[in-house]
């Protein structure tokens, strides 16, 4: 993935829980703007597929069918 060539981004710690939440939103928005659609899709694909590996085969096929119907 292209992230190797980019400068690493860090989230600024807040003094309160509210500041932490606001800083997380700012961090995540900046990250999403810095990543191409292709890279973002590949990252999400890894996460989703890893979650589905823990599901039994029958449930996996049901989820796969639902996802395919939404792509059309």
Image (spheres, rainbow, N blue to C red):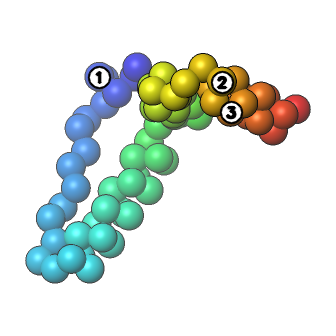
- Of pointers 1 and 3, the one earlier in the residue sequence: 1
Left or right, 17 with respect to 48, comes to left
Nearer the observer, 70 or 30: 70
Marks 1 and 3 in Cβ contact (< 8 Å): no
Q: Nearer the viewer, mark 2 or mark 3?
A: 2
Q: Disc 1 designates what residue?
A: 4
Q: Within 10 angstroms of label 3, few (less than 14), some, or many (20 or more) residues?
A: some
Q: Residue furthest left?
A: 15
Task: Tell how many labels.
Answer: 3
Tag 2: Cα neighbours inside 10 Å, few (<14), some, or many (≥20)? Answer: few
14 up-or-down from 69: above or below: below
Placement of 31 over or under 15, stated as above or below: above
Q: SS class of the residue under badge 2?
A: helix
User: Is residue 44 rendered to the left or right of residue 61?
Assistant: left
What is the CA distance from the residue labelled 2 to the residue labelled 1? 38 Å
Quadrant of residue 27 in the image? Answer: bottom left
The location of residue 9, given as percent across then percent down, is 25, 45
Secondary element under disc 3, as helix, strand or loop, is helix
What is the number of the mark on residue 63? Answer: 3
Assign a secondary structure to mark 1: helix
Discs 1/3, front? 3
Q: Compare marks 2 and 3 and give the one earlier in the sequence.
A: 2
Q: Is residue 71 visible?
A: no
């Amino acid at each position: 993935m292209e992230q190797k060539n980019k400068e690493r981004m860090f989230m600024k710690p807040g003094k309160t829980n509210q500041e932490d939440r606001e800083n997380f939103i700012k961090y995540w928005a900046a990250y999403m703007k810095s990543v191409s659609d292709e890279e973002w899709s590949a990252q999400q694909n890894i996460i989703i597929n890893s979650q589905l590996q823990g599901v039994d085969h029958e449930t996996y096929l049901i989820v796969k069918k639902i996802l395919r119907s939404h792509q059309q």
